[in-house]
Amino acid sequence: MAKVNRELIQNAGIDINVLIDKLKKAAAAELTTYYYYTLLRMHLTGPEGEAFKEIAEDARLEDRLHFETLVPRIYELGGELYRDLKELHDDAACAAAYLPEDVTDIKAILKVLVGAERCAVRIYTDICNYTQGKDPRTYDISLAILHEEVEHESWFEELLGEGPSGHFRRRVPGEGPYTQRFRHIE
């Protein structure tokens, strides 16, 4: 635990326990989304579904990167991860991205994906608002993740015909152009 960092954040008006709770819930949402996106991606089949699989894969891998980016910050602040996966799942900031009833309905799968991304955008906007000007490190991490979540949302909106997204192919799957600087693993 970074004691001086904690002290400065608390002196700036942040309730560390509230912040840790927000980060844990966000991390739980990222890990569960990574899992559920694996299932959703597996059902993107047929000519239409295969065309979307790569985009879903980028979002899936970047969500794993988001989880891995949040974990060290949680521990730096004196928090810890859930000891039970069920507790993690149930405490996630976003509802589970379950497969739709008709697993062959590509549009329904895309709606699940965009819904999950919209929840993530709300989570990181909240964390950014909570930490702005008070906790630069958490703010920086959350803002980087927010940039990627906004991109993910726009990708799936475009695929649903809700407008252009400006989606650009990642150089490598799961690149995380904004969060890669926080990467702790290779």
Image: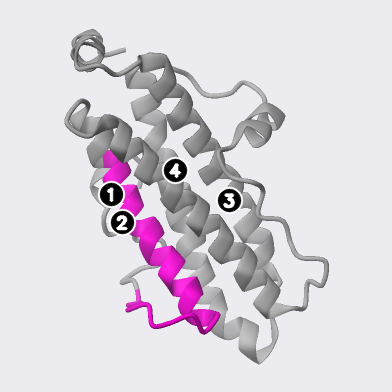
Q: Which badge, 2 or 4, is on the more N-terminal residue?
A: 4
Give the label, 3 or 2, closer to the camera.
2
Q: Residue at x 58, y 64 (%)?
A: 113
Q: Residue at x 29, y 19 (%)?
A: 14
Mark 1 and mark 2 in contact (Cβ < 8 Å)?
A: yes
Disc 4 element? helix
Q: What type is the residue that disc 2 sits on?
A: His
Q: Residue furthest bottom?
A: 47
Q: Is residue 60 above or below residue 171?
A: above
Q: Which residue is mark 4?
A: 123
- In the image, which residues are magenta? 141-169
* 10 Å crowding of disc 4: few (<14), some (14-19), many (20+): many
Residue 3 placement, left or right of 125? left
Disc 1 element? helix
Q: Which badge, 3 or 1, is on the more N-terminal residue?
A: 3
Disc 2 element? helix
Q: Which mark is residue 144?
A: 1
Residue 146 placement, left or right of 102? left
Q: Which residue is mark 2?
A: 147
* 10 Å crowding of disc 1: few (<14), some (14-19), many (20+): many
Q: Residue at x 38, y 20 (%)?
A: 75
Q: Is residue 6 above or below residue 139?
A: above
Q: What type is the residue that disc 1 sits on?
A: Ala
Q: Which badge, 1 or 4, is on the more N-terminal residue?
A: 4
In space, the residues marked 3 and 4 are separated at their CA atoms by 13 Å
Q: What x and y, as percent, mark residue 15?
A: 35, 15
Q: Which residue is mark 3?
A: 33
The quadrant holding residue 83 is: top right
Q: What x and y, as percent, mark residue 82?
A: 58, 23
In space, the residues marked 2 and 4 are separated at their CA atoms by 12 Å
